[in-house]
Each structure stands twice: as structure tokens, then as C-alpha cells.
Image (spheres, rainbow, N blue to C red):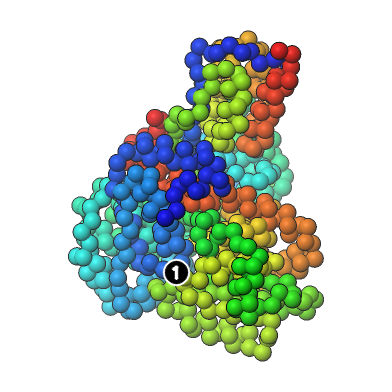
Amino acid sequence: MITLSEYAPIVGQEVIDQLERLAEGLGPARFVHVNSTYTGGGVAEILHRAVPLLNQLGLETAWHVIEGDPFFFETTKSMHNGLQGFKVELTRKMWEHYLEVNRANARKFDWEADFVLIHDPQPAFLINELRPRAAHWIWRCHIDVSRPHLPVWRLLRDIVNQYDSSVFSMPQFAQNLPHPQYIIHPSIDPLSDKNRELTDAEIQGVLNRLGIEKDKPIIIQVSRFDSFKDPLGVIQAFRMVRRHTPCQLILAGGRATDDPEGDRILAEVQEAAAGEPDIHILMLPPDAHYEINALQRASDIIVQKSTREGFGLTVTEAMWKGKPVIGGAVGGIVIQLQDYQTGFLVHSPEGCAFRIRYLLHRPEMARRMGQLAKEFVRNHFLITRHLRDYLTLLTIVRSPEGRVFEF
Amino acid sequence: MASLPEHAAENAFWFRDCFLMTMPIGQKAINLRELLHAMYEVSDAVLFYHLFQYRLAIIAPAVEYPNDFALWAANALQDAKLAEKLSSFDPFDYENLAQVRQAVIDLLEEYLWDLPYIPWARPGMEFHFCEASTVVFRSQISAGTMLEFYEALKKVGYDSIYYHLFEGRWRLGVREMDDFSYWIETNFDMPELVAAIRNMDIYFYSLREIHTSLLKLLEGCLEGPR
């Protein structure tokens, strides 16, 4: 098991000392996380690492996952899309099923806690059934809810209103709610298989296995096959670049168990890339962290051309590898890619193509941008900062009367 | 400048850690007129966040604009002239937040008065008003002598620099006084160093630059005659 002290060489011993002091100030507490998947997606990834570390800091921390059938996950996927602004229709039958699956899960849970953090809409209704089990209920929204489809948000809002506080990834996502709202940016783990340092031989081994030759510059987008990630726009941009500069494109995607839409989008991408040997479409299993790490490190430019994004942890991962990153100017990507400094922000396939060409022809600029990006992530988006935010949040929500707490 | 005195201070200086939780209040401005109207209504905590605390939330590699309002004018309204005016504004010129608020209102009002149109934010770049809660606690880093203070300063984070300089100036009720210079003044005979720290244009610099400048000031003393 990874221990806290292993992060000291990366973030500095002072940061670890601060975490210990914060945990000491908070005192003994039971902290429960609930989400809807053990694998796939940034939420599960960070919980896998954060939960043991919080326990090491003396917080009795547990992680529970709700179970659901395919109809439940279709429903919550529709909710997810609706919250991101798509005009989806949630039927009464879907909504009833959503509530019923939550009730069924609630009957199986026997935890009690001082603080419970409910991740995203899937388990949100648990509060209705389990309110007395925890002193403080916090709803953690990882989704870009800056312009939600109103009928969907109305349904969810009635549930969220019952919470004591909520946490969003960006101020833009905050809503009109009757309780305090906080901002916590997500984070990555520099010691995980997805982010740890790799040797050249390890990287080459993965390229060989996946049949990728590094004979031309590699441009990559790593993300689920999801319409909001705009893989078709990336292919369009790539074709524009290719008219001027030789290069190859990798679209590497995973599939989360709570996302039934993936297969349809993948088919559309395959059709768009048909007959083009320099486009590699890699459907990787959710645990292919090591392969993704190697692919990112082998790449020259990393793209995340999302049209909606909660935060965009794939951007954080790419920046941590010291690569120049081009991202859609949406959601949390805007915070991470400080335009011209830690990356480039784009608004269209044309903009994406232009910046790819710009960087391919200016390797020195690409190198400098990558270095700045890595330092930026070290200061703001590593798991140690996330742990600090959790501890700070719990300290604050326990005494909501004041705004400054000194000890 | 004088060399570093070797005697110990009467009371050691304990560096504080300061952790910030940004709290959006769920209100936004989509154009300059809405920003102006909101400036009359939002709480002091909101004003304080956008003028001071925001620099702890995200510490950008380079600081082009010293407050959130100037940054928004440049990036969202794409109004370079307004960004220039808001950048030249220094809240440390005023005695209290009420005066600071009036100064921002006057600046925005005068600017809008002369414009034939209302500048609008680019879509998705509305101004989102926030405030913050902070958790402050005594770190394990302290200093009894000036040499220890110098060594300690090398170790502390930007949050500590922010707390002792920015919050310190407001907390002590005297704009030009901060925790560091106050401790040095009351424990050591180093009027030049105290003046140099108080004369730093902290609002203009990033936390990173302030940290470096402080270390340089102390190094200047270290190199002086013992």
C-alpha cells in the first residue's frame, strides 16, 4: 500500500506535515463516500487512492458503491446528459425506477458516519432514506451543470436541497441552493500506474504491443467515447493538420460501467476514421492505466477537445507528463490550461488544427509549455491538495457559524 | 543594510498555514452593468475574495492582472482599457473595505458613463461571485532569531506568505503593517528591513514573486557586516 510519506519527494515534506496537522485539528471522525462505480472515470480512480490515504491520516474513511440494473444506468446517463444541457426526456417510469434503486440500495447499507460525501446524481436520493445515519450530508457534483436542462435539474434540485452543503468543481457550476456551496478541484495521483514515471523501454513495450510505430509525431486524445468529448471534431482537426504536416492520431478510449452510450459513439468514430491508416482507435479496458500512461508519454501533443467538461482529469494527467496540451475552452479545462502558458485553449476543430500545427513547428515552445504545465499541476492538482481540501471542508462544515477557523 | 542580529526575539514567530475553501454564492454578472450593480450589493466577504483571496485559489505561473475584476475585463469582456484601469487600482490605498468598494464603484461607473455600449462577457465567461471560508492554524515552523526566520521563510508555502502579508495588513488595521515587519520591528533594531518589507508593492506581485523578494531582502542582511 502506498503511504503518505511516499508523496514527500514529489510535493515536499511540508505539504505532508500540513495534512497531518489538519487531520489532528479535525480529530476522530467517520467519513463515508458513496458513488456508482468502482471502475472507470476520474471519480472512482481518485477514490481508490484517497480512501486509504485518509485512513492513514486518522480519518475512519469508507467507500460504498450503489448497485443498479442497465435501466437504472440508462436513466442516470440521461440525467447526466440533461444536467450537461442536453434536452433529454426523463419519463415518470425512469424517475420512479431511479428512486426505487436508491431505496433498494439504502436498505442494504448499514454504515453510520459523521460526514457523508455523495458523488454525483446516481446515489443522491439516498439522503431521503438514510438522513439520520450521518451528521453532515454533502453532495459532490463532478458534472458541468453550468446550463442544465431545467426539467432534469428541477427533479434533482428537490433532492439536493435536502443536503447540508454541496461541492462543485468550478464556480460556474454553482446553483441557487439553500445551503453553502464549495469548490474543490479534482486531482490526480502521481504514484498511480496512470501517472508514475516510466522508462523508455516500458513506453516502447506498450507501443509495440499496441502496434504503434513512432515514425511520425503522435497526437493523442484519451477519453471515453462520449459525444461531449468530440472525438469526431478531433478527427476533423487531424485531417486538416495532415494536409500540411505528417503526423498520426491516437484516439484511446475506455468504457465506464455506468455509460451505455459508449458503443454507439465508438461506431461513429470508426466510420469517420475508415480507410485512414494513421488514425489508431484503441478501445482499452478500464484498468489499462499503465498503457494510457505510456501512450501519453510517447505522444508529442495531447488533445482534449471537449465541448462540455466537468473538470477534465485527462488534461491534468497530460500536463503532469510535461506535454503541451490543447483543450476545448470549456469547464475545468479553462482553469488548467492558462492560455499560452500552461497550454492552448481552442473553440473549434479549426482552432485545434491550428494549435497542433503551431506546436509541431515550435518544439522549444512545446517543451516550455509542458514544463510550466507540470509545475502548475504539482501546485494545484495532485491528490495531496485534494486531501487537504477534504480536511479543510470537513473542518468548515462542522462549524458553519464562522468563516475563519483558527487553531 | 544592517546585518542580521543574533539575539533571540522575546516571542518566537510562528508561521500560520492558511487554507481556503472558495464558496460560490450562486450569483453572476453577464455584462459590465451587472457587475457594477452587484458591487453595491455583494457582501464584504465577496469583495475581499475577488480582490485578495482569489490569488490563493489558483496561483498562475504569471500574474498579468492583480485582481479578479481586471482579469475578467481582459479575458471575458476583452476590454483592455478597463483591464488597465482596474489593474492600477490598489485596495491598500484605502482605510477599509467600504472605501475600497466605493472606489471600485466609482471606477466602473465613470467608465460606463462614457461608453456608448455595454461590454458583454463572452458566452461561458460570466463573472461568478464567490466568497471563502478559511482554516488557519499554527504550522510547525517557527523562528526565534532572524537567521531562523530566514531559514523558515524558505520552507513556508505561499498560503503562509498570503496570510501574514495580505490578511495581516487588514487584520492589524494599519494598511502598511504586516505580521512579518511587525515582529521584526518589535524584536530587533532593523528599521531599514522593516521599511523595505512595508514598501513592497505586494498587490502588484504574485505570491511567488513576493516570496522571492522577501528572501532577497533577508539575504541582503545576511551578506552585510556581522
- Please name the residue that numbered disc 1 is placed on: A40
Picture residue at 45% right of the left edge, 47% below the top = A4
Question: How far across and how far down the image is residue A119, in percent?
Answer: 37, 60
Residue at 58% across / 23% down in the picture?
B149
In this rendering, is residue A92 above or below A107?
A: below
Provide residue B37's location: percent of width, then percent of height: 53, 43
Q: On what subunit does the disc labeled 1 rest?
A: A
Secondary-structure class at tag 1:
loop
Which of the two residues, A17 or A197, is positioned nearer the viewer here?
A: A197
Task: Kindly tell me whether residue A61 is visible in this rendering.
Answer: yes
Give above or below for B52 relative to A32: above
Give whichever of A247, A160 is nearer the camera. A247
Quadrant location, the N terminus of chain B: top right
Q: Which amino acid does label 1 sit on?
A: Gly
- B73 sits to left or right of A384: right
Q: In which quarter of the image is residue A394?
A: top left
Q: Quadrant of residue A197?
A: bottom right
Q: Give me the residue at 40% from left, 30% from top.
A: A406
Direction front: furthest residue:
A201
Q: Which residue is drawn at 60% across and 27% down?
A: B151
